[in-house]
């Protein structure tokens, strides 16, 4: 769970810093419909709790929690580049450091997070966690998503549920990127890897 803890600490450190360029942040609550959540989790969606937009150094994040009529819930976080962050660290570089580092740091990180590759969603994806809690991280161009579900005890069921929700979120996020491209927003090279990965998964 080290990755989850480190990410949370980085957000808390900048909790008071709100993004001036919040219009560039993806709306996490808009990436899943109630029907999609209900189809995967069961039970009707009773609430959506937006976490707002937060700037954490090089990352600009948007979070949302979907609560249902059952004990199950889903938390979705989207991280994009923070143009106002004053850092050269991109989300892709942050991803590389977390999941493709080498040396002693990698060995300790793998012991703590048990990061496992998950095929068939996004450009690449990893599940981190243990038998009690975990999250699915999905890379899409210069953006990554984090999805975790509550109320499901079996780890394999949590992974499958998180993947199903991630597929829906990535599909909608990709449509948003296409809209941005139509309006000339965002670098084309940041969209291309996710686009290729999505076509391969179809």
Image: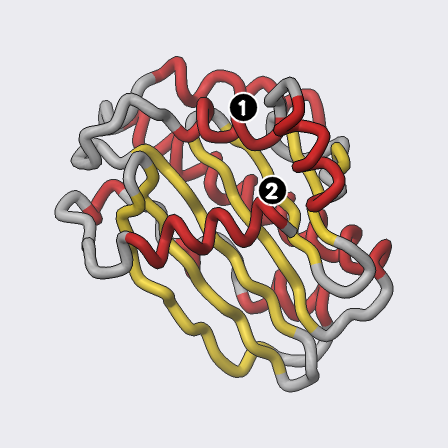
SS label for mark 2: strand
Mark toward the viewer: 2 or 1: 1
Q: Up-down: is 110 above or below 100?
A: below
Q: Up-down: is 38 above or below 163?
A: below
Can you name the residue that lies furthest to the bottom here?
Answer: 69
- Label 2 Cα neighbours within 10 Å, binned few <14 / some 14-19 / many ≥20: many
SS label for mark 1: helix
- Label 1 Cα neighbours within 10 Å, binned few <14 / some 14-19 / many ≥20: few
Confirm whether residue 107 shows in the render: yes
Q: What colour scheme has been applied to the protein in the rendered image?
A: secondary structure
Confirm whether residue 198 shows in the render: no
Can you name the residue that lies furthest to the top here?
Answer: 189
The label shown at residue 137 is 2
- Per the image, the residue denoted by label 1 is 96
Disc with the residue nearer the chain's start (2 vs 1): 1
| In front of the other: 72 or 105 | 105
**Residue 146 point in image, percent of width and height:** 55, 48
The label shown at residue 132 is none
Question: In the figure, is residue 46 to the left or right of 186?
Answer: right
Q: Which quadrant, please, contains the C terminus?
A: top right
**Residue 80 point in image, percent of width and height:** 37, 37
Residue depicted at 82% across the width and 60% down the height: 131
- Using the rendered view, name the quadrant where residue 24 is placed: top left
Query: How much space separates mark 2 and mark 1, taking CA atoms?
Result: 12 Å
Residue depicted at 66% across the width and 25% down the height: 104
Residue depicted at 75% across the width and 40% down the height: 111
| In front of the other: 168 or 122 | 122
């Amino acid at each position: 769970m080290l990755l989850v803890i480190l990410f949370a600490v980085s957000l808390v450190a900048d909790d008071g810093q709100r993004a001036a360029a919040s219009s560039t942040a993806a709306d996490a609550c808009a990436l899943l419909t109630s029907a999609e959540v209900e189809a995967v989790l069961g039970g009707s969606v009773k609430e959506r709790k937006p976490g707002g937009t937060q700037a954490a150094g090089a990352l600009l994040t948007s979070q949302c929690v979907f609560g249902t009529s059952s004990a199950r819930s889903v938390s979705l976080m989207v991280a994009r580049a923070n143009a106002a962050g004053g850092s050269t660290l991109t989300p892709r570089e942050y991803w590389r450091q977390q999941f493709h580092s080498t040396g002693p740091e990698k060995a300790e990180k793998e012991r703590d997070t048990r990061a496992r590759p998950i095929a068939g969603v996004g450009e690449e994806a990893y599940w981190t966690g243990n038998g009690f809690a975990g999250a699915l991280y999905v890379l899409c161009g210069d953006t990554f998503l984090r999805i975790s579900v509550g109320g499901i005890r079996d780890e394999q069921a949590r992974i499958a549920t998180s993947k199903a929700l991630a597929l829906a979120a990535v599909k909608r996020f990709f449509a948003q990127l296409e809209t941005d491209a139509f309006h000339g927003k965002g670098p084309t090279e940041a969209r291309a890897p996710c686009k290729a990965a999505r076509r391969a998964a179809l």
